[in-house]
Image: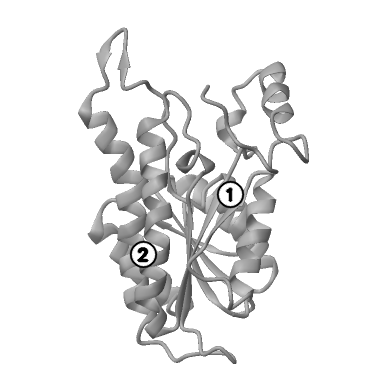
Amino acid sequence: MEVKNTSIIITGGASGMGAATAKRLTQLGARVALLDLNIDGAKKIADDIKAIAVLCDVTDPASVEAAIQAAEKHQGPARVCINCAGIIHSRRMISQQGPMPLDEFKKIIEINLIGTFNVMRLAANVMIPLTPVGDSAERGVIINTASIAAFEGQIGQAAYSASKGGIVSLCLPLARELAQFGIRVMTIAPGLVDTPMFEKLSTEARASLAASVPFPKRLARPEEFAMLAQQVIENPMLNGEVIRLDGGLRMAAR
């Protein structure tokens, strides 16, 4: 699918990989809406790249539906949906404080996994009636964000790994379901990405993490996620697959 003049919605667009993707796609001529709870951050990015920012809670069906409608009113129905919204989490199931509170586990699943599915179902519903475009007669593309923690979750990542593993598991069955409508579903599983969550780490800690990556020996850049998202949009044969973006990293137990 062509990026230029295509309406695209990106959740979690206020920072990190979502913001980088928005910047790259608008530079290529896309019409982009940033959906985020951090509306001030989203507006700042949107103003810089001539996009729009829409308040959105991915766990709330009414909020997502309203956000998609607001984006459609401004730039037409979205043919591309990129799900970057999510939170990280690190806590052992059993620690010195006792079992992990169940509500804590539920929160991670609700935001990362259920939030992704919530946006997918509502975005796909808008794509299905659209007129097919291009030689492949595509109606839409959905790109989700998992993590290599879905495959090699470390100690303390049980909730996070479960949420990202669920996103991985959504990919193929939903790609099969939506194929009849000309809608592709892909998932990107990043490794260590230099996003705001790493800003609090010391120089030594960052260097240690970078050294764990086989090649290149550094943290991935959000712009590299954006580059891959562009390639997924443009290549119609990419469907129903999870692509690792990790420099060959396989995480150890801790």
Q: Which residue is at the far top?
A: 96
Question: Disc 1 or 2, which lies upstream in sequence?
Answer: 1
Q: Judge whether 3 appears above or below 21 on screen.
A: below
Q: Which residue is at the far right?
A: 216
User: Can I make out residue 56 in this image?
Assistant: no
Instruction: Kindly identify the amino acid type of the residue bearing the numbered disc 2.
Output: Met
Q: Could you say which is closer to the camera, residue 129 or residue 162?
A: 162
Residue 3 sits in quarter: bottom right
Q: Which residue carries the number 1 mark?
A: 17
Q: Which residue carries the number 2 mark?
A: 120
**Which mark, residue 196?**
none
Q: Give the residue drawn at x 50%, y 36%.
A: 152
Q: Position of residue 174 (x, y in %)?
A: 37, 68
User: Can I make out residue 84 in this image?
Assistant: yes
Q: Give the residue drawn at x 21%, y 29%.
A: 102
Quarter of the figure that contains the N terminus: bottom right
**Within 10 Å of the Cα at label 2, are there few (<14), some (14-19), or many (20+) other Cα atoms?**
many
Q: Could you say which is closer to the camera, residue 163 or residue 59?
A: 163
Q: Judge whether 133 appears above or below 28 on screen.
A: below
Q: Could you say which is closer to the camera, residue 54 or residue 185?
A: 185
Disc 1 is placed on an element classified as helix
Q: Give the residue drawn at x 62%, y 21%.
A: 201
**Within 10 Å of the Cα at label 1, are there few (<14), some (14-19), or many (20+) other Cα atoms?**
many
Q: Position of residue 231 (x, y in %)?
A: 65, 67
Instruction: Kindly identify the amino acid type of the residue bearing the numbered disc 1.
Output: Met
Q: Position of residue 13 (x, y in %)?
A: 51, 53
Residue 50 sits in quarter: bottom right
Q: Position of residue 109 (x, y in %)?
A: 31, 42
Residue 21 sits in quarter: bottom right
